[in-house]
Amino acid sequence: MPTGRLSSELILSALLVGLMGCSGDSAPASNEVEQSPADGSELTVLLDAGTVGAWPAGLDPATNTTAGFNLTLMNAVFGGLFQLAADPEGSNPRIVGVLAEGYEITNDGRTLVIHLRDSVRFSDGTPLDAEALRFNIERNIAAPCACAPIRWPWAEENRVVIVDNLTVALNFSRPYSAAINGLPVINVNWPASPAALAAMGEDEFRVRPVGAGPFRIVSNQLSSRLELERNPHYWQAGRPLLDRLVFQSIASEQAAYLALLAGDAQVIEGVTSTAIIEQAKAEAGLTVTPQPPTAPYVIQLNTSIAPFNDARAREAIYLATDVEAIRQGLFKGWYPAAESFTGPGGLFHAAEVPGYARHDLDRARALVDEIGGVEVKLGTLQSFVAEQVVTALQSQWREAGIDVSIETVDIGSLIQALRSREWQALLQTVGSYDPESGSGVTLRFGSGQLFSGVADPALDALFADAASATDMHDRDALYTTAAKHISDNRYAPFLFAFSPTQIVTRGVSGPGLTTPIPPIAINTAVHWQDVSLHHQ
Amino acid sequence: MAALDAVVAASPARAAQPAGIALPSGLLCLVAVLCFLVPLVGSLPSPTGGDVLAAGLPPFSNGHILGTDLNGNDVLSRLAYGGRSSLVIALLANLAGLVVGATLGAISAQAGGAVDAVSMRILDAFIAFPSLVLVLVIAQALDASVPGTIVALSCFTIPAFARVARAATLRLREQAFMLAAGLSDAPAWRILAFHVGPNIVPQLTSFLFLGVGISIIVEGALSYLGLGVPPPAPSWGNMIFHGQQAMHSQPSLILLPSLCIFVTVLACNLLADALRRRWTAQ
Amino acid sequence: MRFAARLCLSVAPVLFAVSLITFFAIEVLPGNTAEQLAGVNATAEQIERLEQALQLDRPPWVRYGEWIGGAIVGDLGVSLANRQSVVSLIAERLPVTLALTSFALALALAAAVPLALISVYRPGGAVDRTVAILSMTGLSLAGYVLAPLLILVFAVQLGILPSIGYVPLSDDLIGGIRSLILPATALAVPLLGLYTRFLRGDLLEQIDSHDYMLAAKARGIGPWRALLRHALPNSLFGLMTLVGLHLGALLGGAVIVEQIFALPGIGQLLLQSVNLRDITVIQAIVLLLATATVLANLTVDVLYAALDPRIRHGRA
């Protein structure tokens, strides 16, 4: 029977080769532009259609609700006032000014001062000055996006103040030095041209916004394909190094990988599949760059209802989980085990927490017997990796006598389950480069938070203090204490710190693509202005 | 000339051709036995709950004759249990299509004056509604589950059967005995039940067996849309879906379930063929 | 004129019913556009503000009434997600899906008819059995399995066709066709298997059960002519019905193929809009598909009437 299939494929191949043999066109496929030494060249980047590659609301920073995912697109078009940079080996991560010249934290941490550069222009030629920046910030604070700075403790009055033509001050009601660490993933980081907005109107501005980044928009097919060309008004001479940049949304990592091999694209951002990463590593023409992880996987347990309102049940989960087996079996040991909400690429990282309840199957079984049985519904959002992990967890917990059923849900159902507080256990990621950045750690561990399974005032106080402290050592001590507190109370076991991998063809190089830069939240921000392509 | 002679003269002989009903039925029974009985009798490991450290083993490994998948589950066991799910889902979805769809289609075609124009429009609306949208809505409304999958597949099979039955009934109406029945005082339902029904059933049964094969594949495609048999439970379709990422390193994860589907589709097709020949020869 | 009016009268109520079903099907789904857009990490106030901005807090009948009022005069509204005109969103993507599905259908039909004919010429012979194996292989291969295999062979190893992306036919005809060959083939192969099997079966049924083949022989018409002039048109009618009723599944297959080959078609727009509960876009696509289905059915009925006399004539 297999011969039947083979022969049909051969026949089809023969037919199609026969058809194509006379096409005469032997040039490499589609997107490569002829390279001249003086100009840059064209790069095609493939993005996962489910997350990064979906921008249904457009790209205007004030209305793009998925800007936190579309980081890479926003950076290419709007550049970013600040970006996270690192040394070529990934060490010494620090916030550097790109469109901005620098920042200052004054007033005991209550004020963040942004110094703009002289003569930075939007791609329509209008200047990015303090007035334009203030207009943008006010507009962006009100955005309906998780990427808006609504959690920042803004001052009641004069929250955004123009100091002089190139200086803007952001005022907070209490010390908040963590603001700058989260700024690169907040929409405030991406100023848009007020003049262009007024000229185009809000609706069209969603599709063709004008920013000051290294590239400007040629065409934008929402959630499908974004074509960019170099911004002639970009502030830095000699940048960007590419002439054209194309972002293409693609649904299957397998298809993306094949496209890379075929030469129809040069970059896949954010690969998660172990099988694909392994194949890519063995491929001579590809460069594989894992990014330093900052957000570990965590199993959130809902402590407000059964079974996890009983601390023994929570402990049983900790003891029944064999992180080593999952790390090695599913992920070839690539990702380090985690015992708190920090990862090796982020700030305040501690690999081990004293007193953490590690894998011990016998004790787990004993606990389950003592309780009289535990029944859990374990939920997760749809993704290959997450589903593999919960499947493995189900097997492991069952060995301890825990009755586990798995639910993979979409966002709508997840929000519903969370709102009704009916959920029991959820596989999520938590944390970021700075625990305060992005949605922050309190999203998963704060009292009264929709997505949190914990209501513990002591923990809230620890996180609040850590957010306000200005001294890094103080913050470190507070987060260490918080991690121990979570561990002692068995609120949520952590698994391993996972981060996506960048795969590029040889000849492509750039910070965040071929050098590791910790992701502030979820995805690494590539410095598109410094990315180059050299044909071999 | 020779061909036509053979056609005209050899009908009875052809009905006795070797690949009659026996072979494909036997094949289908074999598949069913393997999927439903062997797991009960043999000592297969469980299709789920495998050891993650034993993930990705190739065929002929120790203890796993067909290897393990990316989560460490035994492939042979998953093929057997997956076959159960796939076959049951495909059969139920097509039966639903046959019963509901064919009835609707036959009524719709027969209606022409005997039934109210309004009900015909309603039936048309039902048949016209894009199945894909319905499937997507169901995928969003219900999480992945076996009943949800059957309902979703029925969204394709019911309109399909409705239209086949409609076309077959239309073709039938022109035949002499149907015209005669129409002229008689027989009520519409009698005409449908005793004249239309028996005459379109052969074509529909063949269509059913064709449909079973397609449904098994579509069930796998539903995994793309968030429906299908929920993991970690296997079905041939979702084994292919999940095995895609290891296409290079472990092609057996895709090839083996595809092979099972091929054998089942082959058997169904041959059976459909043989049934058609048996019925038309009568 | 009267015919056109009757056409509208019969189609309009169907479309109205379809749009009503769609609206309430989407209403029933958990979540609304604001929640889906804002995503998992947004706060409750943000979601509420977005709901107000999108006017989702109005009762369902008001929202439906507003939509249907616009639709009747041809204004299909704007997308809830991005405020772009629904018509322009669809117009951007429809040609892609049309090109893909037409190409796939053409490939499948162009191959199925000759294959079915040669297998029917000598039923049970070597050719028949080979074609049978081939078509059943095609039937059992899922489009989404075949697609990566095709990409692997033709784009990666042979390098003669592009693996992803779409070139508009209006911009570059050759380039456009090249970008569609692999996706159309992935779609067409299962169809090819199905159509070949069906056509073969139907042709054989005609040869077995109708006596006009005998009559043709009596008149001295050769077997091929009898096949082509009498059996084939009848079977083609059945085949067209099959094609028509499989349009739904064809579109479903197209959605997945579009995803794999990164073709910006209607399928992706539909998937996303259902995810986002973007009702205006969904309604427009549903109406488009329903209209196409109704028109296809009507065409088949008309064709049947046209073919009818020839059938009776053939049986004489």
Image: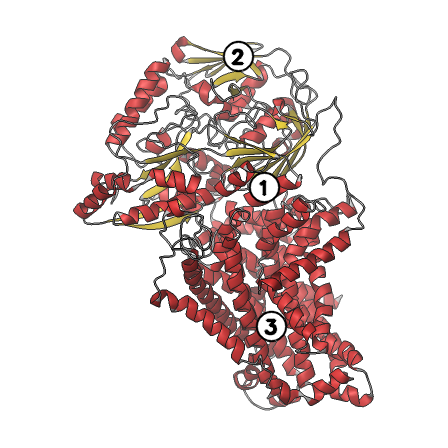
| Amino acid carrying mark 3 in the image | Val
Q: Return the chain for callout 1.
A: A
Q: Nearer the viewer, mark 3 or mark 1?
A: 1
Secondary element type, mark 1: helix
Q: Which residue is nearer to you in this view: C85 or A301?
A: A301
What is the quadrant of residue A301 in the picture?
top left
The residue pinned by badge 2 equals A102
Q: Position of residue A152 (x, y in %)?
A: 42, 22
Q: Can the viewer see residue C191?
A: yes
Q: Are marks 2 and 3 in contact (CB under 8 Å)?
A: no
Q: Position of residue B59 (x, y in %)?
A: 46, 54
The residue pinned by badge 1 equals A257
**The furthest residue to the left:** A370
The quadrant of the image that shows the C terminus of chain B is bottom right
Q: Are callouts 3 and 1 both on one chain?
A: no
Q: Return the chain for callout 3.
A: B
Residue neighbourhood size for the residue with mark 1, other residues' Cα within 10 Å, grouped as few (<14), some (14–19), many (≥20) = many
Q: Can the viewer see residue C12?
A: no
| Amino acid carrying mark 2 in the image | Gly
The residue pinned by badge 3 equals B164
Instruction: Work out how far the residue at label 2 is from the one at label 3, CA to CA, in angstroms.
Output: 71 Å
Q: Are callouts 1 and 2 both on one chain?
A: yes
Q: Position of residue B224 (x, y in %)?
A: 52, 51
Residue A114, placed above or below residue A483 = above
Residue neighbourhood size for the residue with mark 2, other residues' Cα within 10 Å, grouped as few (<14), some (14–19), many (≥20) = some
What is the quadrant of residue B192 in the picture?
bottom right
